[in-house]
Image (cartoon, coloured by chain):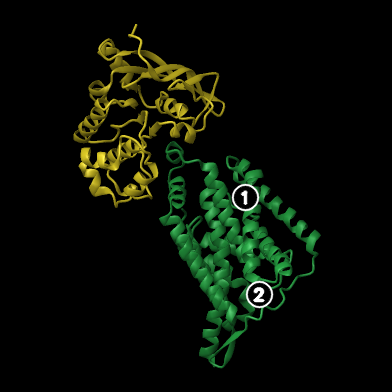
Chain colours: A yellow, B green
């Protein structure tokens, strides 16, 4: 057993549906305060659906989701977002037809993370302010998306596939950004398929297959071959 | 005299173009935001005219009546959206068309019930005419052109320079991300509908000095609005402006050279443009 620590997010028996077909089967997971939790598995196993269910974007039944002790199961996405649960989708989390500056203005909520914080720690963002979200490269979009998420001053950052489609150097850069944010005490739930990336960042790992959690544990206690088995195509 | 007639017709065309623009930008804007093509938009235009008549007979002030009527129509629009249309957002398009077409029938009967079927004229406003190249041109047409341009400018500022406009653009470009940013889509749908219906009502109100109000006026304008909206690209505001100008001016000038074809001109122009650009002049938003 893990030592008892306060959870920021608890998902109990999550069952999600698209129309009549069930996508998730009794998914249980939790994220502790200040923890990075990774949800891994192949394409189509239900990782994104899990995140979207937490955000209130997918139909779910007979389950319970607690965020900072509050039951958010029935809340609408915008209400959940306003509580400080910030979701960055795999497309990058940037509005394509808004400038980066507008993206920031729309997301800004008062707190520790300010535009100045972003410019200080991710200086290349400053040069992108006048560009439209749709004109950014994959890596720039990721960085701007994470910055945008930060400006909401999240209690929990939920990031879908942060390393997807990025060149290895950029993946390392994004990993650096996220581990810096972890040091700031930010809790995160991320999905990904890039094993070195996960291993560098995550405290705990949940492995999904066929809409279920198959194995979970801290990255030290999960045997590497088990993880590889579930990630192999 | 040929050249003077041309200028004259150009001005006539421009002023009708502005009426098309005011109405169709409302339609294309609500479509862009809600993805519902609202047949009842023409009914809002009609209500704008009748409300203006009613308010004018009460107050005797045209400007006040136009503004009041447009605000009232905007409110009717929000009530329709909150009470009925919003339940159709996730339904297939035919349901939305049947629903909004049902509203058309309801509003037409409401107008017939209260105002009768006989077209109603606005009492003369005494706005007068200006003398141009030996002819008298109605001053109101110039007002209409100015109002149309002002609305364009106002919409530009509203959409590009306000937080509300930013949220609207964000929601159009990525609905999921917008909700995940804490934007409440319901508020945006309702306010967008208010603005769209307000513009339809304003168009109806401003049509009064030119033509009488009648229960069938909504059908006429909705067809023109559809033409403009499709031609400019669905949901595309710049497209609505440009295609309104094209249709209005083509009608105005066309009346000079092909008087027998006036009715067909908008359709011919639409067909010609869609052959070259099937997605509309500026494309769908």
B15 with respect to A157 (left or right):
right
Image coords of residue A121 (percent x, y): 21, 37
Secondary structure at numbered mark 2? loop
Question: Is residue B280 visible to us here?
Answer: no
Residue at 51%, 49% (x, y): give it: B33
In three-dimensional space, the C-alpha distance between marks 1 and 2, rounded to whole angstroms, equals 27 Å
Subunit of label 2: B
Q: Residues within 10 Å of mark 2 (few under 14, many from 20)?
A: some
Label 2 sits on residue: B209
Mark 1 or mark 2: whose residue is earlier in sequence: 1
Image coords of residue B47 (percent x, y): 69, 61
Residue at 53%, 80% (x, y): give it: B10
For residue B199, what is the image quadrant?
A: bottom right
Up-down: is B102 above or below A176?
below
B249 with respect to B61 (left or right):
left
Residue at 52%, 19% (x, y): give it: A63
Secondary structure at numbered mark 1? helix
Q: Which of the labelled discs sits on residue B78, or is there none? A: 1
């Amino acid at each position: 057993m893990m030592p008892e620590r306060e959870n920021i997010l608890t998902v109990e028996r999550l069952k999600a549906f698209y129309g009549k077909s069930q996508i998730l089967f009794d998914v249980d997971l939790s994220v502790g305060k200040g923890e990075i939790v990774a949800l891994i598995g192949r394409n189509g196993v239900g990782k994104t659906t899990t995140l979207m269910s937490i955000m209130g974007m997918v139909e779910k039944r007979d389950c319970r989701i607690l965020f900072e002790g509050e039951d958010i199961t029935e809340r609408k996405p915008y209400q959940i977002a306003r509580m400080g649960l910030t979701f960055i989708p795999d497309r990058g989390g940037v509005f394509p037809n808004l400038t980066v500056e507008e993206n920031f203005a729309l997301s800004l909520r008062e707190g520790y993370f300010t535009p100045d914080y972003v410019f200080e720690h991710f200086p290349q963002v400053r040069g992108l302010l006048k560009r439209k979200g749709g004109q950014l490269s994959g890596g720039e979009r990721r960085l701007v998306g994470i910055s945008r998420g930060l400006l909401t001053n999240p209690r929990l950052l939920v990031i879908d596939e942060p390393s997807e489609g990025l060149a290895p150097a950029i993946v390392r850069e994004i990993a650096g950004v996220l581990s810096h944010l972890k040091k700031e005490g930010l809790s995160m739930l991320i999905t990904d398929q890039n094993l070195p990336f996960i291993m560098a960042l995550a405290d705990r790992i949940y492995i999904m297959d066929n809409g279920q959690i198959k194995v979970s544990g801290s990255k030290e206690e999960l045997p590497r071959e088990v993880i590889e088995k579930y990630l192999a195509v | 005299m040929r050249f003077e007639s041309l200028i004259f017709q150009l001005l006539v065309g421009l002023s009708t173009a502005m009426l098309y623009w005011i109405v169709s930008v409302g339609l294309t804007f609500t479509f862009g935001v809600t993805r519902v093509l609202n047949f009842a938009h023409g009914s809002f235009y009609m209500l704008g005219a009748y409300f203006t008549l009613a308010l004018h007979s009460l107050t005797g002030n045209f400007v006040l009546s136009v503004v009041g009527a447009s605000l009232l129509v905007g409110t009717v629009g929000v009530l329709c959206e909150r009470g009925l249309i919003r339940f159709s957002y996730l339904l297939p398009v035919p349901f939305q068309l049947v629903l909004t077409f049902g509203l058309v029938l309801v509003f037409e009967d409401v107008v017939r019930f209260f105002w009768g079927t006989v077209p109603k004229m606005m009492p003369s406003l005494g706005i007068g005419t200006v003398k141009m190249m030996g002819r008298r041109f109605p001053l109101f047409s110039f007002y209409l052109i100015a109002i149309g341009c002002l609305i364009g400018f106002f919409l530009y500022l509203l959409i590009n320079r306000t937080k509300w406009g930013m949220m609207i653009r964000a929601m159009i470009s990525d609905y999921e991300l917008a909700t995940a940013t804490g934007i409440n889509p319901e508020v945006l749908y309702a306010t967008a509908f208010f603005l769209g219906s307000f513009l339809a009502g304003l168009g109806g109100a401003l049509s009064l000095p030119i033509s009488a109000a009648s229960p069938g006026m909504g059908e006429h304008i909705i067809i023109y609005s559809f033409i403009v909206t499709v031609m400019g690209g669905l949901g595309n505001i710049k497209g609505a402006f440009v295609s309104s100008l094209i249709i209005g001016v083509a009608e105005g000038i066309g009346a000079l050279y092909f008087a027998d074809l006036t009715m067909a001109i908008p359709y011919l122009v639409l067909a010609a443009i869609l052959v070259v650009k099937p997605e509309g002049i500026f494309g769908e938003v």
